[in-house]
Image: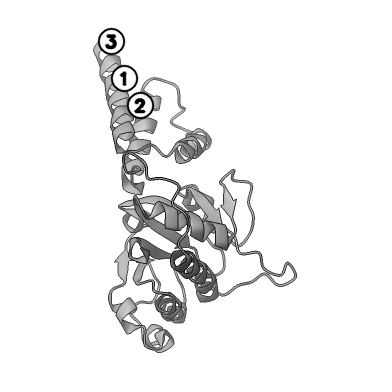
């Protein structure tokens, strides 16, 4: 079950945090580590802090961007140290872990952790279906990256051992993150062509549309229908010119 969960670290600045993350993952039975543009990796500090989790480090996948790290994932959770007004559903670690155990019955899952000092950007959080927030002491809420991974990994281990109830698998697997990104590019292009979207300022509207479709979570068949509608719209517009 946990083999379908990947831990994604974005732009990690301290190699030691990568090693400590690998150790936290192996403690809880997680093995799939993805690194998006790490500033120092491979590195001796990572190996030292891994403390025996060298196999997790050796299999770590280094990615040039977040798109590559999320490819193939139908459910994406972003870790956020602070609550934000992004209108993205926020879960505590325990219900989040239970939800992930349900999701892995049908698709791969990514849990994304941001930079040590600034976390994930709003655009990166906008790629997520849910956020996970660890409710720390409000007077001292600074949590080390590897410690945050440890908390979430522990809850995942607990949920998988206890066997969270699977509500029911979808008839078709959900569209993956890379399929959704291709759809968003196609959607923006089509909306600009028909004059609905201002090409000089598309960000706010596209952010709202991302939230809408992230909530809807279309499956592969539905995604093919949506892409077909966009293609037909473009073709109709070209024929009128």
How much space separates mark 3 and mark 2, taking CA atoms? 15 Å
Residue with the mark numbered 2: 190
Residue drawn 57% across the image and 47% down it: 89
Residue 185, percent from left and from top: 35, 37
Q: Quadrant of residue 218?
A: top left
Quick one: 174 or 36, which is closer to the camera? 174
The reply, left or right, for residue 62 in relation to residue 129 is: left
Q: Nearer the viewer, residue 34 or 25?
A: 25
Looking at the image, is 124 positioned above or below residue 46? above
> Is 24 on the left-hand or right-hand side of 73?
right
What is the CA distance from the residue labelled 3 to the residue labelled 1? Answer: 11 Å
Question: Up-down: is 155 above or below 126?
Answer: below
Give the quarter of the figure containing the N terminus.
bottom left
Q: Position of residue 214 (x, y in %)?
A: 46, 41
Residue receiving disc 1: 233
Judge by depth and name the residue closer to the eye, 178 or 28: 28
Residue 120 showing in the rendered view: no
Residue placed at 46% from the left, 39% from the top? 210
**Residue 4 to residue 76: above or below:** below
- Point out the tag, 3 or 1, that comes first from the N-terminus: 1
How dense is the environment of label 1, judged by Cα within 10 Å: few (below 14), some, or many (20 and up)? some
Q: Are marks 1 and 2 in contact (CB under 8 Å)?
A: yes
Q: In front: 59, or 67?
A: 59
x and y percentages locating residue 200 in the rendered image: 46, 32
Which mark is first along the chain, 2 or 1? 2
Spatial CA distance of label 1 from label 2 is 7 Å
Q: Is residue 58 left or right of residue 187?
A: left
User: Mark 3 sits on what residue?
Assistant: 240
């Amino acid at each position: 079950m946990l083999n379908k969960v990947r831990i994604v670290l974005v732009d990690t600045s301290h190699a030691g945090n990568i090693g400590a993350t690998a150790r936290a993952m192996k403690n809880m039975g997680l093995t799939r580590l993805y690194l998006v543009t790490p500033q120092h990796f491979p590195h001796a500090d990572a190996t030292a802090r891994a403390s025996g989790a060298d196999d997790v480090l050796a299999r770590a996948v280094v990615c040039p961007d977040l798109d590559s790290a999320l490819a193939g994932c139908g459910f994406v959770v972003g870790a956020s140290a602070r609550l934000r007004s992004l209108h993205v559903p926020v879960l505590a670690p325990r219900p989040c872990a239970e939800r992930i155990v349900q999701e892995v019955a049908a698709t791969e899952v990514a849990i994304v952790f941001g930079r040590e000092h600034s976390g994930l950007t709003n655009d990166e959080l906008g790629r997520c279906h849910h956020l996970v927030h660890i409710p720390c002491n409000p007077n001292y809420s600074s949590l080390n990256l590897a410690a945050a991974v440890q908390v979430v990994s522990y809850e995942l281990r607990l949920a998988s051992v206890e066997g969270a109830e699977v509500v029911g698998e979808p008839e078709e697997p959900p569209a993956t993150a890379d399929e959704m990104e291709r759809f968003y590019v196609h959607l923006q292009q089509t909306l600009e062509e028909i004059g609905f979207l201002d090409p000089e300022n598309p960000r706010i509207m596209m952010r709202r549309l991302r939230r809408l479709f992230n909530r809807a979570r279309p499956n592969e068949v539905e995604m093919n229908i949506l892409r077909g509608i966009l293609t037909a719209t473009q073709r109709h517009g070209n024929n009128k010119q």
